Image (spheres, rainbow, N blue to C red):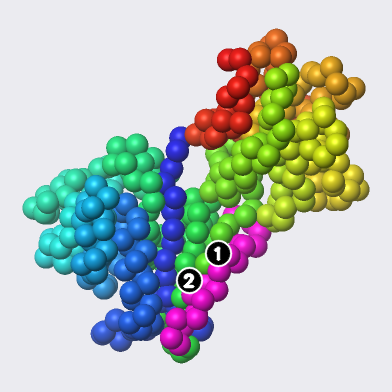
Amino acid sequence: MPLPYVLLSAAVSLDGYLDDTGPERLLLSGPADFDRVDEVRASVDAILVGAGTIRADNPRLLVNSPARRAARLAAGRPEYPLKVTVTASGDLDPEARFWHTGGEKIVYTTDHGVDRAGGLGVAADVVTLGPDLDWRALLQHLHDVRGVRRLMVEGGGTIHTQLLQQGLADELQLVLAPLFVGDPAAPRLFGPGAYQGGRLRLVETRRIEDVVLMRYEPTAPGTGATPTAADRRWLRTACELAALCPPSGTAFSVGAVVVAADGTELARGHSREGDDPVVHAEEAALAKTDPADPRLAGATVYSSLEPCARRASRPAPCAELILRAGIRRVVTAWREPDTFVAAADGTGVLTDAGAQVVVVPEYEDLAKAPNAHLPA
C-alpha cells in the first residue's frame, strides 16, 4: 500500500542529546535554522509529534511565515498542515497549545487509550490503531484517508527511533549544534535496538549560522516481504531507468538495480542497453557485477518488471540469471503481462527456488509508462 514520504527532523548537541534536564527547553539552533524548519513545515501535508513532546515542549507546530501560509492557500492547500500526535495511553493535556493553534488535528491511539483521548474535549479526530501502536497502519491511514503525501516528524526520540528501525523513514534532516550536554539523564535522539542495516547516504550538508544541517537517506534494502522506504526508493530508480530504453514494439522497456545488503549499489542496467538490441535489464545489470562478489548473496534486485521466466533471445531467462548469481530477494513493480509470453511467471521460478519476490503495486503506473505504446 502507498505510504507518505516520511521526513524525520531533529536537532542535537555534539554528544547526541535533544535537550538538557533543565526546566526550560534547550535551544539548539538559531533564527536562520528556525526559518528553515518553517519552510519545511510549509512544504508538507502533516506534522507529527509524540504525546511526550507535547507534554515536555508544549509546541504550537505552526507555519509562522504569512507569505508561506498565503502560498499554501493560493495552491489550494490548507493554511496549516494537519497536526498529528500519537499516544498509547490517551494521556494528553487538553490545555496544550497543540490543540488551540493551527488547523486540523488528529490523534492516533490504542484500544486502551481511545476513551481517554476521545474525552479530552478538544477539536480533533481520534483514531484507534488496535491493541498496540502500529506505525504502518498509521501511515496508511494518513495516506489513504487524510490524503497526506509528505509527513514531517518532529519528535520525540522514541518515534524517530521506531520509524528508522521499522524502515519507514525516507529522509533524516539532522541539525548538529556546537555544544555539549553531558547529562546521561537528558533525552537522546536515538535509542537502542535493531535498526535497518547499512549506512545512510549523505545527500546534503549546509552551514546555517553556527549549526550544520545534514540530510540523509536510508539505502539498505529490506529483509522481508514488507517493502521499506529504501526498497521504494530503489524501485523508483529502476522504474526511472526504464525510461532510458530505446523504444521497441516487440519487447518491454525495463530498468533494474542490484543493491547490496548494506545499501551499496552494485550495478544498474536497462533493456537494450548499449549495442545489444535484445539484452534485458536484469541481465545488463548482473553483467556488470563480479560473480565472485560475496555481497551478491545478500543483495536485492530491483526491477520495474517481474524478471522473465522464458525468452527466445537468450538461453537463460532473467529469473535464472538472478538465481545463478546467488541473489534471493527481488522487488518489482509490475507482474509481466501476457503481451509477448503466455502465462509468464518469473515470480514462480524465483519462489520455487527459495527466493523472495516483493511486488510494490504503487509503482506499477511508473513502470508501465515507458511501455504505453505496446498492446495491452
Residue closer to the observer: 323 or 108: 323
In the rendered view, does 256 fall on the left or right side of 113? right
Inter-mark Cα distance, 2 to 1: 8 Å
Q: Position of residue 168 (x, y in %)?
A: 49, 50
**What secondary structure predominates along the stretch shown in magenta?**
strand
User: Which stretch did the figure color magenta?
Assistant: 194-214
Quadrant holding the C terminus: top right
Residue closer to the observer: 160 or 274: 274
Mark 2 surroundings: few (<14), some (14-19) or many (≥20) residues within 10 A: some
Question: Residue at 82% of width from left, 40% of height from top?
Answer: 274
Res 73 label: none
In the rendered view, does 269 fall on the left or right side of 153? right
Q: Quadrant of residue 11?
A: bottom left
Is residue 242 in view from this perspective?
Answer: yes
341 to 70, vertically: above or below:
above
Q: Position of residue 299 (x, y in %)?
A: 74, 46
**Residue type at the position of mark 1:** Tyr
Quickly name the residue at label 2: 174
**Residue type at the position of mark 2:** Leu
Mark 1 surroundings: few (<14), some (14-19) or many (≥20) residues within 10 A: many
Q: Position of residue 184 (x, y in %)?
A: 45, 82
Quickly name the residue at label 1: 216
Tag 2 secondary structure: strand
Callouts 2 and 1 close, C-beta under 8 Å: yes
Is residue 352 in view from this perspective?
Answer: no
Question: Residue at 69% of width from left, 29% of height from top?
Answer: 247
Residue closer to the observer: 124 or 285: 285
The answer to which of marks 2 and 1 sits earlier in the sequence is 2
Is residue 312 one of those drawn in magenta?
no
Is residue 199 one of those drawn in magenta?
yes
